[in-house]
């Protein structure tokens, strides 16, 4: 394959053309795109490592090349003319051949209404302080949900929103809000460093792209406690699992202190997965935990195994919903298949019981 026949810009424009979400470049394979959750090879010749390296190097800076060669990994974002914005990841495979994965970032930020998000999310962004965690596996739409929540604040409030991301994905225009977007590695050295200085930048809302470390979680909880609305992501699959993950990040006596802080400062956990929609597209299945006095008490006392049953009570008033409940409703509306739901379910037996299987 010669450079004349195809280049990285043409490949990324194929993602847009086919309505796909991702592009994968791996040696000894034709370029492949992900459409509605499944990989589809493009009708193009097989690539070798040299071709991939030449294309991939053409869109990154000398500094980024140095990072890649030293760390063997690179996360970045890039804007491609007539294609859009992409989050890229470069990595090495066998025989030190470069490979790449690109995720398309819509240039138009979706609203919560366009995402058909539960109405409770609009209430969560009105909070003056506290922690909101959006969780799910890679590719579950966490960034899209968080971006829509930021957009909701941007069109309804006059506040300063500070985002700390790696890299910056959705680029927000200042509407009613003032939005400062910082990219780890470019604008700040780390999530923790940015968070340490964040409170001196007079933010009302702080968005943390990923709560990766104990230090980051600790500072995020402190900011949520002291009068800021903090939103962040974790790679957990359920609402209760998210609380466990946060608590388990700490050791010994620290855990009781963290449970105390969480019991009062946690606003909500939104745990989501993306499933194939019938007949095409994808749909977000969201489990939502809203903190209230009963749940706060269970968190404080370490009775996290009782939180799930509490989530099932008075849902019309609380706005809470379980993953199983949303999956059952979606199956009954013929939005998703039973097989797809079971493949992604956190509790397949409960799902089968609810479906009467």
Image (spheres, rainbow, N blue to C red):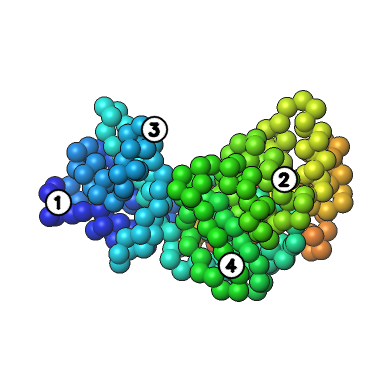
Which circle marks residue 3 in the picture?
1
Measure the alpha-carbon separation of dots 4 and 2: 23 Å
Q: Nearer the viewer, residue 281 or 118?
A: 118
Taking the spot 21% from the left edge, 44% from the top edge, the residue there is 54
Q: Earlier in the sequence, mark 4 or mark 2?
A: 4
Q: Of the residues under marks 1 and 3, which one precedes in the sequence?
A: 1
Alpha carbon separation for disc pair 3 and 2:
30 Å
Mark yes or no: residue 328 visible: no
Identify whether 111 is placed above or below 264.
below
**Disc on the earlier residue, 1 or 4:** 1
Mark 1–mark 4 Cα distance, whole angstroms, equals: 42 Å
Residue under numbered circle 2: 221
Q: Crowding at label 1, few (<14), some or many (≥20) Cα neighbours within 10 Å?
A: few
From the viewer's perspective, is residue 111 above or below residue 66? below
Q: In front: mark 1 or mark 4?
A: 4
Tell me the SS state at disc 1.
loop
- Tag in front: 2 or 1: 2
Which residue is labeled 4 in the image? 178
Find residue 6 and report its horizontal and vertical position in percent.
18, 54
Mark 3 or 2, nearer chain start: 3
Circles 1 and 3, Cβ within 8 Å, touching? The answer is no
The CA span between labels 4 and 3 is: 35 Å
The residue under label 3 is 71
- Residue mark closest to the camera, 1 vs 3: 3
Alpha carbons under labels 2 and 1: distance apart: 50 Å
Please give the label number shown on residue 311: none
Q: Nearer the viewer, residue 226 or 321?
A: 226
In this view, the residue in front, 178 or 306, is 178
Crowdedness near tag 2: few (<14), some (14–19) or many (≥20) residues, C-alpha within 10 Å: many
Question: Residue 224 vs residue 7: left or right?
Answer: right
Q: Which residue, as the protein is rendered here, is positioned at the far front? A: 200
């Amino acid at each position: 394959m010669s450079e004349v026949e195809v280049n990285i810009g043409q490949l990324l424009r194929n993602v847009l053309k086919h309505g796909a979400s991702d592009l994968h470049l791996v040696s000894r394979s034709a370029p492949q795109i992900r459409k509605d959750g499944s990989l589809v090879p493009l009708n193009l010749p097989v690539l070798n490592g040299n071709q991939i390296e030449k294309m991939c190097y053409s869109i990154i800076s000398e500094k980024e090349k140095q990072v890649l060669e030293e760390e063997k990994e690179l996360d970045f974002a890039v804007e491609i003319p007539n294609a859009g914005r992409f989050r890229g990841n470069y990595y090495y495979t066998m025989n030190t051949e470069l490979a790449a994965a690109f995720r398309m970032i819509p240039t138009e930020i979706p609203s919560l209404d366009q995402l058909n998000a539960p109405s409770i999310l609009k209430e969560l962004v009105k909070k003056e302080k506290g922690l909101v965690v959006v969780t799910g596996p890679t590719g579950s739409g966490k960034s899209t949900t968080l971006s829509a929540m930021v957009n909701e604040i941007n069109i309804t409030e006059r506040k300063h929103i500070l985002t700390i991301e790696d890299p910056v994905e959705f680029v927000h225009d200042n509407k009613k809000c003032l939005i400062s977007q910082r990219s780890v590695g470019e604008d700040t050295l780390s999530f923790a460093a940015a968070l340490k200085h964040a409170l001196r930048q007079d933010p009302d809302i702080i968005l943390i792209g990923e709560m990766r470390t104990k230090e980051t979680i600790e500072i995020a909880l402190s900011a949520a406690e002291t009068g800021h609305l903090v939103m962040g992501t974790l790679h957990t699959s359920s609402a209760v699992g998210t609380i466990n993950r946060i608590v388990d990040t700490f050791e010994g006596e620290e855990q009781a202190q963290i449970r105390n802080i969480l019991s009062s400062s946690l606003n909500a956990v939104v745990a989501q997965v993306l499933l194939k929609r019938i007949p095409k597209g994808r749909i977000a299945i969201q489990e939502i935990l809203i903190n209230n006095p009963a749940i706060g008490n269970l968190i404080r006392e370490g009775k996290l195994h009782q939180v799930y049953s509490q989530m099932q009570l008075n849902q019309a008033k609380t706005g809470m919903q379980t993953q199983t409940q949303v999956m059952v409703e979606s199956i009954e509306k013929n939005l998703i298949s039973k097989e797809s739901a079971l493949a992604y379910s956190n509790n397949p037996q409960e799902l089968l019981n609810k479906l009467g299987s």
